[in-house]
Amino acid sequence: MTSDAAIAAARKPGPRQGPLAGVRIADFTWVAAGPLATRFLADMGAEVIKIEDGRPGHPRIDRIRRVTITRGTGAKSVGHDYGDFNLNSSGMFNNYNRSKLSVTIDMTSPRGRELAERLIALCSVVTENFAPGVMEQWGLTYERLNEISPEIIFARMSGFGHSGPHEMFRSYGPVVQAVSGLSHISGLPGGGMPSGWGLSYMDNQGGYQGTNAVLAALYRRNQTGKGTLIDLSAVEAGVALIGPKMLDVTVNGATTRGGDFPSGNRLPDNAAAPHGVYPAAGEDKWIAIAVMDDQQWAALKRVMGAPDWASDPRLDSTEGRSAAQDELDARMSAWTAGQDKHAMTTSLQQSGVPAMAVQDEGDKERDPQLASRGLYPVLDHPVCGPSRFEGTPIKFSRSRPDLWRSAPFVGEDNDYIFRDIMGLDPAEIADLKAAGII
């Protein structure tokens, strides 16, 4: 068994590596979109200092710490009072906040806000995704931050943006998806109402846009020496995602609701067939096949053993196959239904036919391609134990992502930040602790 001393040594902060090494971020983000944005920055070597309020009896911590997707307990709803629940045991928090540091500061007190400003003075980026008005209540406007740390980058991520008639509206991923139009174009063929997305899709998309915005601002500051205020609207990011469908509706008179939409994996604006997802052997097993031209159709016929039905002259051209898609899909389903999806993938790919097994989570964890790319790194955690993480899909020839630690405990790095980085003497740290400020 690993000793407590060895675990502590492995989690001790040190110099960062990666293309963003040297960038220090005061991170006020919480829940999903903001922490995901700063997680990517932390993966790339930025020193991300997560600021929470972890005072005993009155914690204003990251709400995702209370989303208890943990080993052995299953999932419970956010915001419920779980009594003695361990705030360091959330698997979701662990995934969103790896490679970060954590300090606790009482932002409701003047002394706590003064301490936060002293920390911000040592940072060149500040990030937040609170409800509009929270940072203003703490006096942390862009103008004030720029006084504390000249030419700072202040990245603000919210549902509607920090201007306009709806700027004070509160939102989460499903709300953003509804307002942006994404929910309206979701559903099943023939359905009369949106079906939603099954997850807070725009939390992730908003996070990706937040990362891009900070990277662009860092590049600009390197070129000009000027910082900036970033005002990111997740709703507007969602609107941008439906651009192609809006164009299709406007130009081609297409619909986003009806008996023929969504169209599955068929291509409504391009002749290509067979082009769909077909059943494979086993329960809820599927394979995606996309034949785009006559050469690929000929290869598919060879893999299938040249069945008699495939010699129908109507199927010799892409246009003919597209016109007979219902019949063709039924034939394909009958052929694929009794076969292993991975074996079919191998034989079809080797013959030049675009195809891939539809993978569930277990398939992805066993996928040799993803394994060879290191997409699921394993990091240990004193409470959650060794866990697979979502890796980074980007490789650099001269640097690498720096996934140095699983998510921090509440206030795990208080002493390191306040003593080693900020230079507070032991007496002041002890006094701050006694006063409940940290």
Image (tube, grey):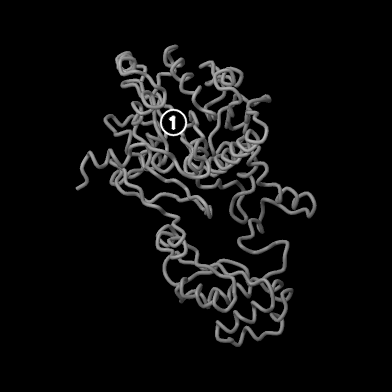
Q: What residue type is labelled 1?
A: Lys
Q: Which residue lies furthest to the right in this view?
A: 251
Q: Between residue 365 and residue 116, name the one nearer to us.
A: 116
Taking 293 as reference, is 76 above or below it?
above
Q: Which image quarter: residue 278?
A: bottom right
Residue at the (64%, 78%) spot, across then down: 297
On screen, 244 above or below 30?
A: below
- Above or below, 243 relative to 261: above
Kindly identify the residue that appears in the image at 46 percent across and 71 percent down. Answer: 342
Is 328 situated left or right of 90 in this image?
right
Q: Nearer the viewer, residue 92 or 140?
A: 140
Q: Where is residue 340 in the image (x, y as percent from the top left)?
A: 44, 74
Q: Helix, strand or loop at disc 1?
A: strand
Answer with left or right where residue 45 lies relative to residue 157: left
Tag 1 residue? 50
185 or 352, which is in the foreground? 352
Whether residue 70 sits left or right of residue 50 in the image: it is left
Crowding at mark 1 (Cα within 10 Å: few <14, some 14-19, many 20+): many
Name which residue lies at 63% across and 56% down: 262
